[in-house]
Image: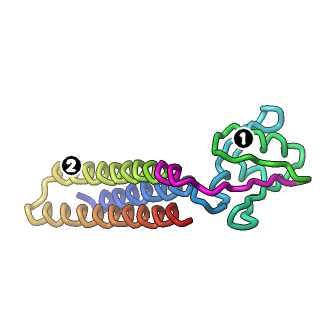
Amino acid sequence: MDPNTLSASRQKMDKALEVLRSDLSTIRTGRAAPSLVENVVISAYGGSARLKVLELATIAAQDPQTLTITPFDGSVIEEIRKGIMEASLGFNPVVDGQLIRISIPPLSQERREELIHLMHQKLENGKIMIRQTRHEAMSEVKKEDLSEDETSRLEKEIQNMTDKHIEEIDQLGKNKEEELLQI
């Protein structure tokens, strides 16, 4: 088995972690963060363009409970407000002159529990992606005509890589759960 297969497996696992991190950042905590709205797709310029909020405006957390969105082009301010409303995020964006303000409501205990459940689903999906990559790498090793020692060494290396990535996913989950439980 050439070293490229190990490297490719590591890259796939790293990519799965990256996707998971990005996915987890969209789970709302009780704190204002630009990641809550930056990837909402807006139908802008009369529907002729579909762009993400971060491509249309500057997003800032004014304080722990307030997000401000300042469009680069003032003519799309109403379309951004409408798009965020339609995204069903539970926010009520308000146009205030040349910017949009979003007050982040505190999370109810029930909502926190729903979000923790959603987070656990996302974490499990991340682990599945990692295990799938391990399975593919192990299959590659078995296909090769290698000595028993070499096969065993490669399988151990793949398993160690898998374990490290799974540990990192568990740590991400622990950190996110602490964030969600803070009041």
Whichever of labels 2 and 1 marks the residue nearer the N terminus, that label is 1
Whether the magenta-drawn stretch holds residue 47 is answered as: no
Query: Residue 10, position in %: x, y?
Result: 36, 61
Mark 2 = which residue?
139
Local packing at callout 2 (Cα closer than 10 Å; few below 14, some 14-19, many 20+) is few
Query: Residue 78, position in %: x, y?
Result: 84, 41
* Magenta-drawn segment: 99-114
Which residue is depicted at the point 69% across and 37% down? 86
Q: Is residue 168 above or below residue 139?
A: below
Whether the magenta-drawn stretch holds residue 113 is answered as: yes
Quarter of the figure that contains the C terminus: bottom right
Which residue is depicted at the point 53% across and 56% down? 22
Quarter of the figure that contains the N terminus: bottom left
The label on residue 157 is none
In the depicted view, which residue is nearer to us: 10 or 18? 18
Q: Amino acid at mark 2?
A: Ser
Q: Secondary structure at mark 1?
A: helix
Q: Secondary structure at mark 2?
A: helix
Whether residue 128 sits left or right of residue 182 in the image: it is left
Query: Residue 140, position in %: x, y?
Result: 23, 50
Mark 1 = which residue?
85
Whether residue 169 sits left or right of residue 114 in the image: it is left
